Image: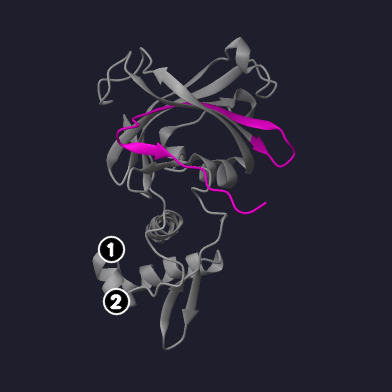
Amino acid sequence: MARTSALPKFVQLSETLIREIAAGHLADGARLPPERDMADDFGVAVGTLRKALADVEAKGLLDRVQGSGNYVRHRPAVNSVYAFFRLEMLKGGGLPMADVLTIDRLAKPKSFAKLGGDNHGHRITRLRYLDGVMIALEEIWLDGAIRDRIAVSDLSDSLYHYYRHELGIVIASVEDRIGVETVPDWAPAAFHLSPGTKVGYIERISWTATKEPAEFSRTWYDAKRANYISRMGKG
């Protein structure tokens, strides 16, 4: 088991704030604490905090008023690193992290035939966390043609960030099927729930802007620790 490369600190902080705003922990129009106080609370340098706030502002979720402060703005959808990560702590929000269990190049199961044209695929298994709390077990498949080999050191906590910046694959939409399943037999001892335990389940196909399937994944999550949340704006 190996921890994937962490996203830059300012990106982690930006994503934390974005998820806190989405969860309603930061109300629309609320004034954030002074920057120096926020930096102390998060344990970062003021410059790192300001870089994060600039990113949140660029995404339309913050008004920075010179001499007055930073004010929260709510928007229904934001193009952030974890825009498609739908699991949140029971109280809402939480910064996602991941530990890689395995990366293997294997023959694809027949049911995955539509995922690219190669007979083989890259199978990645991971443990997922929110704010350091283990919440889920993941299995992700990519088409074998995208790269001969994928190493743990190639990946970051956000696979979609890796797809965009390393593989040139931009995920534009996802299709999720939600249900209840049992933890699979291959679940590691490190996972806090035993094989056969009934848990929340997400089966996902991720698509590019040209409607090409780019990823197939399965997630088994602990509904006592996390909720699946999908927020939509007005139609």
Q: Residue furthest right?
A: 210
C-alpha separation, residue under disc 2 versus residue under disc 1:
10 Å
Q: Amino acid at mark 1?
A: Phe
Q: Secondary structure at mark 2?
A: helix
Above/below status of 3 relative to 76: above
Mark 1 burial class by Cα count in 10 Å: few <14, some 14-19, many 20+: few
Residue at the location (65% across, 23% down)? 115
Colour treatment of the image: one colour
Residue at the location (29% across, 35% down)? 134
Queried whether the magenta region covers residue 190, the answer comes back as: no
State yes or no: discs 2 and 1 in contact (Cβ < 8 Å): no
Residue at the location (29% across, 76% down)? 36
User: Residue 116 at x, y = what percent?
Assistant: 68, 24
Q: On the image, numbered disc 1 is attached to which residue?
A: 42
Queried whether the magenta region covers residue 220, the answer comes back as: yes
Q: Amino acid at mark 2?
A: Arg
Count the labels in the image. Answer: 2
Range drawn in magenta: 207-235
Using the rendered view, name the quadrant where residue 163 is placed: top right
Above/below status of 103 relative to 51: above
User: Residue 118 at x, y = what percent?
Assistant: 66, 19
Mark 2 burial class by Cα count in 10 Å: few <14, some 14-19, many 20+: some
User: Residue 2 at x, y = what percent?
Assistant: 33, 33
Q: Earlier in the sequence, mark 2 or mark 1?
A: 2
Number of the label disc, if any, that sits on residue 136? none
Report the front residue among 167 and 186: 186
Q: Where, quadrant-wise, is the N terminus in this rendering?
A: top left
Residue 185 in view (yes/no): yes
Q: On the image, numbered disc 2 is attached to which residue?
A: 36
Q: Is residue 116 left or right of residue 69?
A: right
